[in-house]
Amino acid sequence: MEITTALTADVLVIGFGKGGKTAAHALAGAGRRVVLVERSENMYGGTCPNVGCVPTKMLVHYAGTKRPGDDAQEFFARSVAGVRALTSAFRAGNFEALNGRDTATVITGTARFINPYTVAVGEGPDVITVTAPTILVNTGSEPVIPPVPGLASSSHLVSSTELTRTQNLPERLVVLGGGYLGLEFAGIYRRFGSEVTVLEAADRLLPREDEDIAGAVEEILTGDGIRVVTGANVTEVRDSGAVSTVVYEKDGRTHTVEASALLPATGRRPVTDGLRLDAAGVRTAPSGAIVVDEFLRSSRPHIYALGDVNGGEQFTYISLDDARIVLDQLLGEGKRSTSDRRAVPHTLFITPPLATVGLTESQARSRGLDIKVSRERVADIVAMPRAYTVEETRGVMKFIVDPDTDLVLGAALLSIDAQEIVNTVALAMRHGITATQLRDAIYTHPSSTEALNEVFDKVLT
């Protein structure tokens, strides 16, 4: 006999990601009755603290501390154990912080819409229904496995999640795709001691970046011993005992490479399968993403979509800003929207990291803009002794400046601490701080930010 428990709430949140949990906390704090549904107990807190930002960046840190005499397998196993301990603590903390509130309840199970205001959670004899006048969908995204013959059935196929949890260091890792995820994992596992090959279908890495910046990134990766093959069209994967043979075509010729672990890193898609959005009357794009307006309202105005599931940029901080927009709708003036976003920075966490914001040089020139360009090798920036103190002088800093307004139009920072410097530059761009003001500002010493004194001086004189 099926037993159904019926709950009602002021707000139902589906998915425990950054946007969903941030909104749930604020709404519960404002006295709203909140129910949050998460399909997996291993994902309390969302992708970032469990299988994304936190574990991968922690592995970047661990990999950078490996000494030449360390046993690669033992060191890797200890590193993964450290990651597991931290993510487990974060997961428990995220659950208790929300479920411990008097006005919030966390339910673990898979949700599916019954009608526009009600979802059923779970299967079998114990089904819970939750009804709410406001619903936030924050179910995130999942990796896409490209339709390469033999890939999906390969016993050596691994996901990024599996790589951050296994304690066995792959001897030979082959990464399909040279985007952010692929290059980060390539850098991590090479530094741990794996042989790493990156197969990228495009003619060069990072095609959205200027060619000189992408070239500098490739030079660093190959200098670290990573084999990078661009223009590679993967045609087949064949399992053979302890390895897979990856077959690819390049320049009209067929090549192979062996892999003990094979990571597809060719993109992610919104997680909407199984939600029964049709039962709610919610419109989706061909990609599966929930179609939203600038206030993140779906085709049903009481249903909002936050984070990767709405088809926007797939970054934790975008999901956080999505929560701010939705909270302004539900608790504020209802004015904040996605159109308010300007100069949003991005960081590729290789070593050293690449951080970018605004226009590239090629984008600015294609628009016919009159620009000045400053490009300096980190090793040549005298005012940046920090690079020498931490023994990481590789990389380049590049800025695009409007000579008429003195405003910064874009930056590409491939350097130590780039993930921090870019936030200063982005803030300046959003608030009209000029290149001259950035040049003449007072920065701590020795720091990486003080490189701005010298790099902007060369473009302004």
Image (cartoon, rainbow, N blue to C red):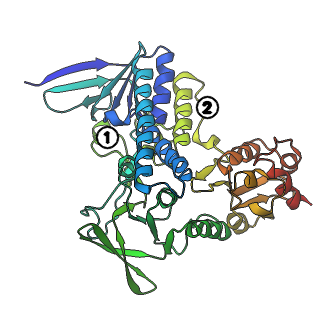
Q: Secondary structure at mark 1?
A: helix
Quarter of the rendering containing residue 413: bottom right
Residue drawn at 67 percent across, 70 percent down? 212
Give the side of residue 69 with respect to residue 121, left or right.
right
Residue drawn at 59 percent across, 69 percent down? 223
Q: Is residue 335 above or below residue 366?
A: above
Return the residue nearer the eye: 251 or 22: 251
Q: Is residue 87 visible?
A: yes
Q: What x and y, as percent, mark residue 345?
A: 64, 49
Which residue is denoted by mark 1 in the rendering?
A: 277
Q: Which mark is residue 335?
A: 2
Residue type pointed to by label 2: Lys
Return the residue nearer the eye: 50 or 40: 50
Quadrant including the C terminus: bottom right
Give the side of residue 380 with respect to residue 266, left or right.
right
* Distance in Å between CA atoms under marks 2 and 1: 27 Å
Residue drawn at 63 percent across, 56 percent down? 352
Return the residue nearer the eye: 205 or 190: 190
Q: What x and y, as percent, mark residue 158?
A: 33, 57
Q: What x and y, as percent, mark residue 384?
A: 79, 53
In the picture as drawn, the residue positioned furthest to the front comes out as 69
Residue drawn at 45 percent across, 21 percent down? 97
Q: Is residue 264 above or below residue 232?
A: above
Q: Which mark is residue 64?
A: none
Query: For the image shown, how many numbered marks are present on the structure?
Result: 2
Say if mark 2 contacts mark 1, CB within 8 Å. Answer: no
Q: Is residue 441 above or below residue 358?
A: above
